[in-house]
Image: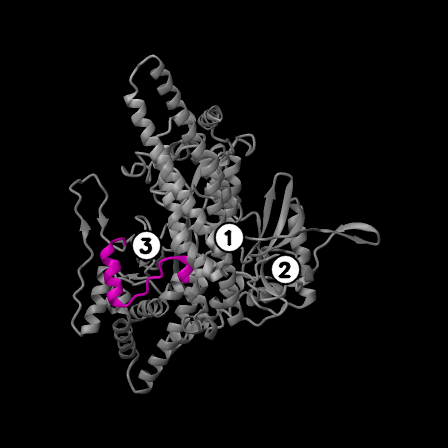
Amino acid sequence: MSKSRNMIKLEAINRQPRKVFSEEKFNGKIPAITDYYAENTFDFRKSDMISDEVKEELIEATKATSKTRIPKEHADQVAKAVVAWASKRGATHFCHWFQPLTGTTAEKHDSFLSFSKDEPILKLSGSQLMQGEPDASSFPNGGSRSTFEARGYTSWDLTSPLFLREGENGRTLCIPTAFVSYNGDALDVKTPLLRSITALNNAATKFLQTIGDKDVTNVVSTCGCEQEYFLIDKAFYYARPDMVMSNRTLLGSLTTKNQQLSDHYFGTIPERVLAFMQELDYKLHRLGIPSKTRHNEVAPGQFEIAPIFEEANVAVDHNQLLMAVIKKVAQKHDFVAILHEKPFAGINGSGKHLNWSMATNTGDNLLEPGTEPHKNHRFLAMVSIVVDAVFKHSKALRMAIAGHGNDHRLGANEAPPSIISVFLGDTLTKIYEALESGSEFNPIDQQWLDMGAGQLADLLRDNTDRNRTSPFAFTGNKFEFRAVGSSQNAGFPLSILNAAMTDALLSATTEVEKSLKAGKSVDESLLELIRTNYKRSKNVVFGGDGYSSDWVEEAAKRGLPNLRNTAEALTVLKDEKATAFLTETNTYRPIELLTRYNVAVESYNMSREIEFTTLSRMVRQYVLPAAVHYKKGLLDVISTQKEIEMESVVEKDILGKVDALLNNVYKALNAMESSYSDSASKDEEEKSLLFASKVLPLSEELANRSNELEEFIPDELWDLPYFLEMLFIR
């Protein structure tokens, strides 16, 4: 096995970058992004097979408040255009692409093959385009129906573009859809997200019209998901049972040099990784996914990709698709992409920073402060409503980012704590404090930075610095929900955020209406709202170090909830008071919340069980045998030296230390296995709480004891790839 590990290392070291953009393929010229952008997506507005009447009908149907139903003959016209477009590009099958409660996506392929008078033809009917009926029996339903009740429906989402999924031997047309039960209950992520988008649109439009913005008839939530991930060579990945089973290392000693020098962050992208990124961008751009930024992240082996803002629903679909494409392209480059929030203990994990804002049909970003934010009462009111929403619904927002992977990241030295707070920055905070106290705010003119070098371009300093330790931070013209996990479907936390904002907007509208009826002007009403909101919710505003233990104590004094792990956070879904805003805004139905609680708890428990049993097996199959083998070698040396009357002081000392470490590992193994066995008689909720509070810490103790032994065992006796190999060989 030691030879096998060395062979794996050599295999990884000797890999060459994969060449994708050959001159032969592109006729001697690498094309510009604009030459192929979105070529694998279907835009009904550009189809000459769809009439102007139907196009206008489809455009109207994409609006959040639309009640438009597409007549069958019009759906048939669209479907005919779709199959002509797709088959011309090599597609032979189609599928309804949806997002069940598994956290990933699902699809069932059907061919375009049909018959007309015994002749084979290519056909996609309007009804096949609009609606599907997948077997829903094996998808998570959280006990919302009986096992034998298998019928489910997929419904075409007109707001998200159809796209072609490329395979080695052909293409498949993917139709983004929602997924509901026979009774119309959401069994997916998309349906509640679309409801939240509709609710936010209605509430924001009403608020803006109340304060005099009569031209605003539509408000959309916008989103951009920064995606972090790790790349490790596939040879190392498949030599680590824990990586294959749980997408993270369950044990392993941290390298002496990792991220302390910050030399990986924004460093030169390794050639083989750059080749992967170039193909990734190419694939994404052809799918109409506006990937913009790519760079090395803080931890070795960690990278990030960030897109341009899009409407929230499309952004979520694109992020789900992006994660799938990352994994697929990585395999082509002999990498495995790891999206787990904490694949390596001791170094930074990965998040999915959800950048969020709202935009009007008139082209305004509602979170744009302008040049004089202290005089922009609409902006100040809107931000105060966001702060109020986070303050009132912080428990639900914490629940929204709960997950077994995120538990290892939140509160560590690279991620916000499990306490939800808002960062506004120095300038905004001072404005609100001045308004609350009735004092005058004196703005400081934007300053030029003096860098002492005339060769450099002049720089204007922003009004405030960024705070990377905040879970929910204002970053200039948007809020960044930094606490979302890297593997998570962003649609769930986004639906909770939209609903929280909707609830706060409805309350704000009521307050403004009362003030206007009392004879106050719009500006006076907005100032009163701003003061009321800030005074009520300022405890959630925090601009300091969110990683510090001092903040945990301070947050407790402020009365802010601290749901420390997923098991605790998920109980919010059963708290009718804490989730009332979700049902009142029609984002979720009560049965859907219970469904999600049951599904999430079961998923958490199964994920932990896989980890515990995998760790136990790895310790028994790798760690203990390596230590016993080393002990045997030491005993043989001691025995041989005794025969020739040679002292074995060093060998005996090493043997004693190895034996002590081995006993520590075995003791920790028995403790974890005993605690885990206690869970067999528990119900799902009791089991999750036991896992989080007792078994997980014991598993981490077992990992630590195994790591101590790893550092003592000779290299040739250790079969598992080291962190050093996985993180630094690319």
The amino acid sitting under disc 2 is: Ala
At x 22%, y 61%, the residue is 427
Relative to 587, is 370 on the left or the right? left
Q: CA distance from mark 2 to mark 3?
A: 37 Å
Q: Which residue is mark 2?
A: 136
Circle nearer the N terminus (2, 3): 2
Q: CA distance from mark 3 to mark 1?
A: 26 Å
Where residue 391 sits, quadrant-wise, is bottom left
At x 46%, y 51%, the residue is 676
Where residue 494 sits, quadrant-wise, is bottom left
How many tags in the picture? 3
Circle nearer the N terminus (1, 2): 2
Return the residue nearer the eye: 605 or 111.
605
Magenta stretch in the rendered image: 547-569
Residue 395 percent coordinates (x, y): 37, 65
Residue 666 percent coordinates (x, y): 40, 39
Work out which residue is located at the far top of the displayed protein and give it. 644
Callout in the foreground (1, 2): 1
The amino acid sitting under disc 1 is: Met
Relative to 610, is 550 on the left or the right? left
* Most common secondary structure along the magenta stretch: helix
The amino acid sitting under disc 3 is: Pro
Where residue 68 sits, quadrant-wise, is bottom right
The answer to whether residue 359 is magenta is no
Colouring mode (rainbow / by chain / secondary structure / one colour): one colour
Work out which residue is located at the far right of the displayed protein and give it. 117
Q: CA distance from mark 1 to mark 2?
A: 20 Å
- Mark seen at residue 606: 1
Q: Residues within 10 Å of mark 2 (few under 14, many from 20)?
A: many
Secondary structure at badge 3 equals loop
Q: Which residue is mark 3?
A: 416
- Mark seen at residue 684: none
